[in-house]
Every structure is written in C-alpha cells, then in structure tokens.
Amino acid sequence: MSLDVEIKDLSLSIGGTRILTDVNLRVPQGSFVTLLGPSGSGKSTTLNVLAGFLTPDRGQVLFGGQDVKDLPPGARQLGIVFQNYAIFPHMTVGENVRFPLVAQRIGTDHGKRVADMLELVKLGGFEKRRASTLSGGQLQRVALARALAARPQVLLLDEPLSALDKQLREAMQSELKAIQREVGVTTISVTHDQAEALSMSDLVVVMNGGRVEQAGTAEEMYCRPGTEFLARFLGEVNLLPVAPDGSCRPLDVRATDATGRLLVIRPEDLRIGRTDGPGFDATVTDVQFQGGTLRLEVSVPDSPLPLVVRSSYAGYGSVPRTGEKVRLSHDFSFLHFVDPAA
Amino acid sequence: MSLDVEIKDLSLSIGGTRILTDVNLRVPQGSFVTLLGPSGSGKSTTLNVLAGFLTPDRGQVLFGGQDVKDLPPGARQLGIVFQNYAIFPHMTVGENVRFPLVAQRIGTDHGKRVADMLELVKLGGFEKRRASTLSGGQLQRVALARALAARPQVLLLDEPLSALDKQLREAMQSELKAIQREVGVTTISVTHDQAEALSMSDLVVVMNGGRVEQAGTAEEMYCRPGTEFLARFLGEVNLLPVAPDGSCRPLDVRATDATGRLLVIRPEDLRIGRTDGPGFDATVTDVQFQGGTLRLEVSVPDSPLPLVVRSSYAGYGSVPRTGEKVRLSHDFSFLHFVDPAA
Amino acid sequence: MSATDLESNLRRGMRRQRPWLVGAGLLITVYLVVPMLIVVPASFTSGSFLQVPPDGFSWRWYRAVFDGDDWTRAFASSVRVSATAATAAIAVGTLAALGLARVRRFGRVLRPVFFLPMVLPYIVFALGLGQVAIPLGMDDTLWPLLAGQAVLCLPIAFLTVAGGMSKIDPAYARAASSMGASWWRTVWKVELPLLRRNILTGWLLAFAFGFDEVVLALFLSPPGRETLPAKLYTEASQNVSPLLASVSGLVVALTVLVALAVLVTRRVSAGGSRS
Amino acid sequence: MSATDLESNLRRGMRRQRPWLVGAGLLITVYLVVPMLIVVPASFTSGSFLQVPPDGFSWRWYRAVFDGDDWTRAFASSVRVSATAATAAIAVGTLAALGLARVRRFGRVLRPVFFLPMVLPYIVFALGLGQVAIPLGMDDTLWPLLAGQAVLCLPIAFLTVAGGMSKIDPAYARAASSMGASWWRTVWKVELPLLRRNILTGWLLAFAFGFDEVVLALFLSPPGRETLPAKLYTEASQNVSPLLASVSGLVVALTVLVALAVLVTRRVSAGGSRS
C-alpha cells in the first residue's frame, strides 16, 4: 500500500536563482518525516517537486524505487493537504472527499468510502454540509479525509496546522499523528513550527539555503546537532568556545581534544540555585516568565555573552529578580561540540 | 511625558453584532500591557478604539484622565506600530521617521531627532535607505522608531512581532521591552502569541467573547487562573474534578471545601519516575519530544482522561516509551481551584 | 464580525475627517447622471420639437415608437445581434481567462492584448471587417457585425471573468490536478462553477455594451436589418424629433435594468462569498 | 526567489497538461489583431481603390495625408480634445478613487455608477449634451465635446486608479492619520505618490480611448474643428479611398505607441513593487 520515497541529488533553479542544491533524502515506508527550515530554505520547493508541480533540473524522485519525474501530479498516487486546505467551496464535504475517487475512477461504492474517511477524521455524518459552513479545524479534517480517500501511497502535508489556533493546533498534532499511524501511509510534512516538527515526526530533516543540513530523529537533532546553524536553529542554545588549553569558561570542563570548537549547552542543562549552593557565581540580567518555565539570562564574570537558563517554575522556590546574585551549576551526562560556522 | 490609560464600560457593536461588552481596563503610566485572546475576542477592536479608528457606542477612553473619545487619531499623541508595519514604501527610512514630526509640526531639528530614534532602534545611519530594501526585522525597527519619534504619550502595538521568524521574534521580544523601558512610554500591545504576552508584559489582559476575562501579572494569570477558560487558554492544564467527599482522584488530595470545583494542575507540577519510586501507578500513552522538555500523556486507572505531564528531558534519565509503566508523583506548594464552565 | 466589516468600519471612522473627498465623489455621480436626466424628460414633451425643458407632458412620442414596426424591428435586431455577440465574447473571454491564468508569466505579456479593443480605432476596425467580408462573400450578412461586436465586447467580458479568476485560490486547480482530475474536469467541475457569477455579470455587461454600439452597426448592418443605435443615428443626423428622445428613454430604461441585474448578481455573489 | 516566481513556475509546471487552453488563448490574440493586419497593408496600395490584397506597394496615400492641411488639422484637433478630456477624466477619476476608498460600504453602491458610461447609449448622451449646450450658448464651442469625452473616458481612468488604490494597504492611510497628518497631507504625500504609475497609465488609456471616439465627435464637433475620427467617418461614408486606410494606419501606429507606453509604465511599476 505505502511506498518508501527517495530523493537523489535534486537540484532546481527558478529564474536563474538556485533554489535546491543536491538534496538527498530517504523516507522509509510508512514513516512520518518533517522538512523543517527557515523561510527560503527550499522546504516548500522540495514538497512541490515531490508533488510534481515543479520539475527539477537534475536528480531523481523515486516512489518505491520507481522514478516519477515524468508523471504528472495526478498519476503519482499522492494525497496532499494544502496549507489553506483548498477545500472546494462550492461542493459539500461529501463531494469534496468523493472528488479523487471519481477523478481516478477508483472503486464503485464511493458513498461507503466517503463515509469511512469522514468517520476516520471524526466528521461522520458531515457529508451534506457545505464547505463554507465549517470551522478551520473541520476544514483541516476534511482536507485530510480527501487526501486519504484514494488510498495514496504517499501523503504530503504543506504546513498542515499553521492556519489553526494554538489550542487546536496542539490537539490536532496528536490526532494527525494517530491517523497517519493507523493508515500507515508514508508521510512528508513541511513546517516552520519547530514544536510541531519535533513532536510529530519519526525523522526531522532540517533544510538551510537549499540544502539538507541534517536529518535524524528529533532527539538526535536536538541533543547532537551537527553544525552551529542547527544548534542555534532548534531551540535556544549556549555555545561556549573551548580555549586552546581545553578549558571552557566558566564551566569546569576540560576538553583538550576539542579546542577551537563550541560546547553545546542547552538552557535546561543549567541549574540555578541559592548563593550558598554548588557551582559558580552569576548575576541575573533578565527574567521572562513563560508559563511553567522561567527563561533567565545571567551574566558570568568570565563569559562575554550572557548565558540563557531555562528552569522549571517550581525549581527555585521563588522567582529570581533581575540583579539578584545566584549560583549556576550544570548537569549533563555527555559533552557535545560543534564547529563554529565559517 | 507618559500617561496612564483607562477604559471604562466600553461597548461597541458593528453591523448589529456586539463586539465589545463593558470592557474595563486600567493601564498604569509607563507600564507594558498586553491584550491576549483567541481570534474574535475583541482585542484588536479594543486597540482600534484606543487608536481612534473606531468610535465606541458607549463608555469612555481616558488618557491621563482626559476623555479622548472625540479626538481624531492624529490628535491623541499616539504612536502605533501596525501589524505589517505600514512603512511608506516610496520614502526613505529617514523620511518615514520624520513624517510624524513634520505632520505635527514638532520641534525644528528633525534631522537630529530622526538620527536619535534610528540610533535607539540600532539602525543608525539608515536614513537614506529605501524602505523596500529592508528586511522584516529592520522594518519592525523603523516602525518602532517612527511610532516613538513624536514622543507619544501612549504606544500601541498591533501584533508587533507576528510577521517575524521565530528566532528574530524571540530576540526582538527582549529588545522591544528594553526600548519601551528606556523610553518609559505607556504601551498597549495586542497579540495572540502567549509566549510573547507572558514574557514581555507587566500586565496581561485576557479577553474572551468581547469581555475582559481576567487581568493580572503573567504569574498570577498562569498560577491562579480565575476561570476554566483561562486555565485552559494559558498553557496546558489538567483539571481534576473534586468529588463530593473532597477527594480528587488519583491524587491524594483532600479538599472538602472545594467539592464540585476543578483542581488546576499544570503539566510541570507532575513528576514521573521509575516504578519503584513514590506516587501512584500510571501508563505512558503518548510521548512527544519538544526539545528540552518531554510532553507525556499518561493514563491512570482512576481518571477517565489521560493526564498531561511535562518533564525536563534530563529528569527521567532516558525517554519513557509508549506503554511503559511509570510512577507519577506531584509537587505543588498550593492548591488552586476553578469553577467548571457552565 | 468579518474582517471586511471591521475594515469598512475603520474606514468609516476616518470619514468624518474627509468630507471633501466624499463630496467630490457625489458630485461626479451627479455629473454622470445629468445627461440622462436631460434626455429622458425631454422625451415626454407634448410638442413637436425636442427641447429642454419639455413643452408639457405626454406619452405621445412613446406611442409613436410602437406605432410603426420599424423601431420594434430595429430593437429586435439589436437584441439578436448583441445577445449573440455577448455570448461569443463571454465564451472566448472565459476561455482566455482560464488559459492565461495557467501561463501567468506569458499571460502578463498577453493580457494587454485584451485591452486592445478598448483603444482600437472603431472606424478602422469597421473598414477592415468590411474589407474582409467582401472576398468571403459575407458582406450582406450579419456575420461581420457579429464578429466585430464580439471583439469589442471581449475586454469587458474577459476582464470580468479574469477578475473573478484572480480571486480564486490557485491551490484549487493544483489540488484537483493532484487528485488525478484531467484539466477538463478541473475546468468543468471546479473553476467554471466558481466563476459562474462573474460569467453572468460579464455577459450582461457585454450585452449592454453591444446594444449601444453605433459605429460598427452603421458600417456593417446589412440593409433592412440595422440595429437600434444605427437607426437612431441615421434619424438623428436628418432631423431631431422628440421620437429620438423617447427611443433613447427606452434604451436608457433597458440599460438601467441590465445594470440592476448586474448589481443583483454581484450582491448575491458578494453575499455568498462572505457567508 | 519571490512567491510570485514560485507561483508562476508552479503554473508553468501545469502547462504541459493543458496545451488546449493555451492554444485557445493564442487563437484569440490572432483574432484580435487580424483586422488591423488587413487595413494597414491595404493602405500601402499604389492603386486608386481600397482593396485586399493591395495593388502593389507605395507611400502614395501616406504622402496624400500630409499634402493637404485638413488631415493634419483634424489630427491636431483630436490630440487637443482627447488630451484635455483625458486630463479631466484622470483628475476626476483619481479624486473618485481616493474618495470611494474611504467610504467602502457606500462606495460599493456608488462604484457601478462609474461603469455607467461604458453602457451609456452614446447617441442619447450626445443628444443630451447637445441639448444642454444650446441654452448655455456653448453649442458652437468645444466644451460639450470635451465634457462628453471626459465622461466617456472616466471609467477607464477611474478603474485604472481604483485598481492601484485597491492594492495599497489601507494601513498606510491609517498610519498617516494616526501620526497627525491631515487628510490632504495623506493624499498628497502618501497616496498620490503610490498611485503615480496608475495615474499615468490611466491617462494614456483615456487619451487613446478619446482619440478614437466617433459618435460624440460627429454630433458635437463645431464646424471646421472636427476630430480625426469624425473626419474619417464623414469621408468613409462618402467614398472608400485608400487615403482612409493610410490615415487609419497612422492612427493604429499611434495607438500601438500609446499601448507600448502603457506596457512600459506597467512593467516599470511591476518591477518597482517586486524589488
């Protein structure tokens, strides 16, 4: 039913501008892969090449080992959820979901299939509703039902949740993932929302400047970023240069084999405590309450840049004030370094 | 220089639909207040009333005690940063910032004031640049410089950071707050971004359905929400109903004076541990890696709904798997209850 | 409250500062309507000469229009010609709007071609059509006139449909094609239904335009089948009788009816898209 | 890469499936241009009769145009009339576009009024203007013709400027007003500069339209000051000499020049907004 997807050495220029350069990507059968990147990184272009809306200059797009480069979008057995859903406004929900079945002359009992799909996305009985009477979340579900109706081999999601409110977006993340798992369709999603990418994907692919920067599981990418760009792009980070003697001020870390590189310390790896605790002295320069966590900036005598610390709200006892002296300690089980960007 | 702002019993209907109902609001002189709410809650409408673009049906808008209801926008001594900045594209940066000075015939040495303002927003020397050659972040700074050029008594921000990328948005939060503090202007911001509201504001005002739901500091609002709507709206929450006997399964909590109400437990108030630890048994049903924190859903024998737990990545030692048995404990210094929504 | 309502109210809020511009807008409206207000009352004169103000009130010249059958024949001829031309123009204009939307970059170059008929020297065009008709043996038929009017109506038809097309999210066509729909199914099931109100409006506007067209009608009407404006012109260049005013009054009434129909379709369309 | 480029490439990607619609678009273009391609070659005939195909090649009939001074006088008269009318139309149209943008809801009702001249029965309008001119003692001046042509050019002028206006973020005007700018400063310093290319395009289109207008010119031109199209018409209804074709050729050349100018201003404008 579902196929693995492979992109090999893909390059694409539009109007003389190079958009994609040697993009390589393997999406295992049935997995959920997210392309993540800043705007202009080429993630949407990659999706459009997969969909067949753009033809690459060079390279291959393989669905289950077969090159689909010359197949038009409609012959690639794709389901696509568009950013604004593209639910046909002059049709009912049922007619929308039936559309791919009729267009591709699939099966005979369309009514049953449409009902099943609407059941899957929890919109059972919505067949007769006009698309224009639906809420954003309902439109999203219809778009998913329509994309899955023709039993596609590959499902493409273009910023699938970006048009939803925060509350709904978080609820839909779990649900979308659950449906994808149930159907088992190979899924490639494009998003600029890190939380969405990290929490939904089996594999995250970070793109930058038309290239694949790194691909891996969310944990790998976050804990062991391969480049400075990646370390800065995913979440917040403190990057401490390792001095020629292997020291890494202000931490009591020795890393003689990593001189000149940058130590990656996430804000939640640092602990803040009363001045009588362990660690080294620091002064709080900024406090942001972020609901559940506190984001602190602290200045340390030896470090030119302030360090960012994220701590649980409950951890410190009370909220530190700007200017307060605290003790900073750290707590990590391994050291990870990246090379500074050129 | 700066004035306090007060809204009294403001009501407004547009085209027969009630948009605002009895809105009351006090913004102390020099403070930074954010109006937060879901779309359609009336927060933008309130800002437009403050700006003078909309005339309320009833109620007063007081700047420093003076009713400005009959003053046109240009006479209210306002600075406004518009959502898409509205930087005049046919003018240079300098001409944009000079615009309010010339229009209001303020001072004589406009060149000096323009240079100062651009210095303030770290765009010194950009006077001659065309607006069309600037990046999004630079446009945001120009908009701020222009809004502050005429020394306004009140600064209004309409989703000031929503057009920026995540990285830039977070950097600008601190900077915008710092500039506001330096200038000392009373500032009212509208946003749908909770993180922005919680981290930047002296006072957060949550609106819902055209009314003020609650106003307070970020911590008050998060830790002691007054209504079920508010508890659910800000961050994630577990709401556990208190049984008639005062128990609150599955927690070992007794609250005989709060029967029928809901206990508010934030995901970070719950601790997850090995099965040999303290607390009660739970089964992990969903794991989302969110970069630095894990969001878990666990099912508990006594609770119909799964509980949401947020834990530091480092806390548990390794990432729990779906289906794993764990022990759940809790850790809070006070109990807070809300009434269930009607 | 929709965003449009808010927007409209924000602008309304600004209005109080700008009565000048609003006043100017109203004056212009009056200026456009005044010539109509002169001709129509003049048609109700009971005298024998066309004059302002009219000499008493009577339906005399309206009765005169329907007395002979030459005016009603001209009217019928006009309706037939402009309905056919409008239908041809809307068909071609719709095709063009659909086609050009698909080749946007190339379309940007082609688009001005559709404005050509608006700046076309009518007489030159009429002469050209007449010349083409002779070798084709069609100089005594309605075909040259129909073809010519269809061309002249084309901008109005094209612009109306293309305006609707530009408001249709291109993702609809992309979605249909990704679901395996042929281009034909996409046009027929997705795009044309979404454009149907624009197509109706475009037809009505093209019809009204063609109905009033004089120059081609004068040069290309076959003898005995001249259209109403052509007959009006011929009569007017001989003597200015109140009969002309009454015919004009009827034409204006028809035009206003068509304009109202356009308004209604636009209103309905706006209402539909707002809900 | 801008979003527009991507969009255009996405559509280009779809093109391969839809050569039909593109073909239709090209055919239509040909159809619009063909009448021109007939008249213009015919003007180069060396014979004494207007015919297709032309009888040899010569500049004879072009020299004839410039031999007498009646054609050049008509040309000058046309330029004067249509330039004046276009200027009036663009002034009024710009004011109207600025004003109606400020009263959007009310503007939605008023907007169709600006389409009225497009469906106005020209003859009726000309008769009305002629009737008004008599009591005002202006029936022997250019004023009625100027006023009439200005009205007829108004839709083209208004639509061009209003089209530009609708693309200007209303936040600009709101921002200017919130910074204490009077409505006049907002119009002068913010809106007019942003509209200047639309205003230029609108003027050129209005000029081209007025230059080709026949009906009003015939009814309202004072004796001895008839415009080029009016003279063309009068000549054409008497005898069809190749001289008409050569004059037509010149008119077409001028029209194409204006159209090119419009294209250039639009290109520059598009380039400006893209950067």
Image: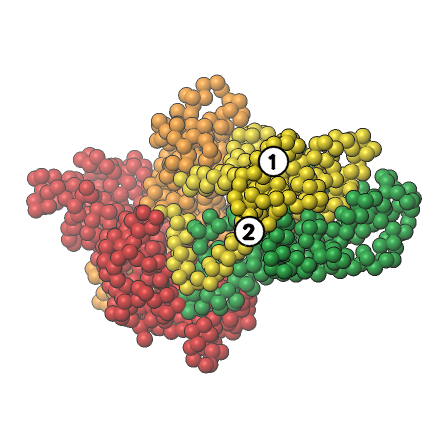
Chain colours: A orange, B red, C yellow, D green
Image coords of residue A242 (percent x, y): 44, 64
Q: Nearer the viewer, residue D91 or A138?
A: D91
Q: Residues within 10 Å of mark 1 (few under 14, many from 20)?
A: some
The residue carrying mark 2 is C53
A279 on left or right of A57: left
Q: Residue at x 27, y 55 (%)?
A: B11
Chain of the residue that carries numbered disc 2 in the rendered image: C
Q: CA distance from mark 1 to mark 2?
A: 21 Å
According to the picture, the residue beneath numbered tag 1 turns out to be C65
Q: Is residue B223 visible?
A: yes
What percent of the width, then of the height, locates residue A168?
34, 42
Q: What type is the residue that disc 1 sits on?
A: Val
Taking the spot 41% from the left edge, 59% from the top edge, the residue there is: C15
Q: What residue is drawn where x is 78% and y is 33%?
A: C139
Tell me where residue C84 appears, x and y as whole percent: 64, 32
- The first of marks 1 and 2 along the sequence is 2
Q: Amino acid at mark 2?
A: Pro
Element type at mark 1: helix
Q: Chain of mark 1?
A: C
Q: Residues within 10 Å of mark 2 (few under 14, many from 20)?
A: some
Nearest the eye: A285 or A141? A141
Q: Quadrant of the C terminus of chain A?
A: bottom right
Q: Looking at the picture, does residue B98 appear above or below residue A20? A: below
Residue A328 falls in image quadrant: bottom left
Q: Is residue C99 left or right of residue A283?
A: right
Question: For this view, does A1 lie left or right of residue B50?
Answer: right
Mark 1 or 2, closer to the camera: 2
Q: Residue at x 51, y 53 (%)?
A: C29
Instruction: Identify which residue, B153 or D2, lies in the foreground.
Output: B153
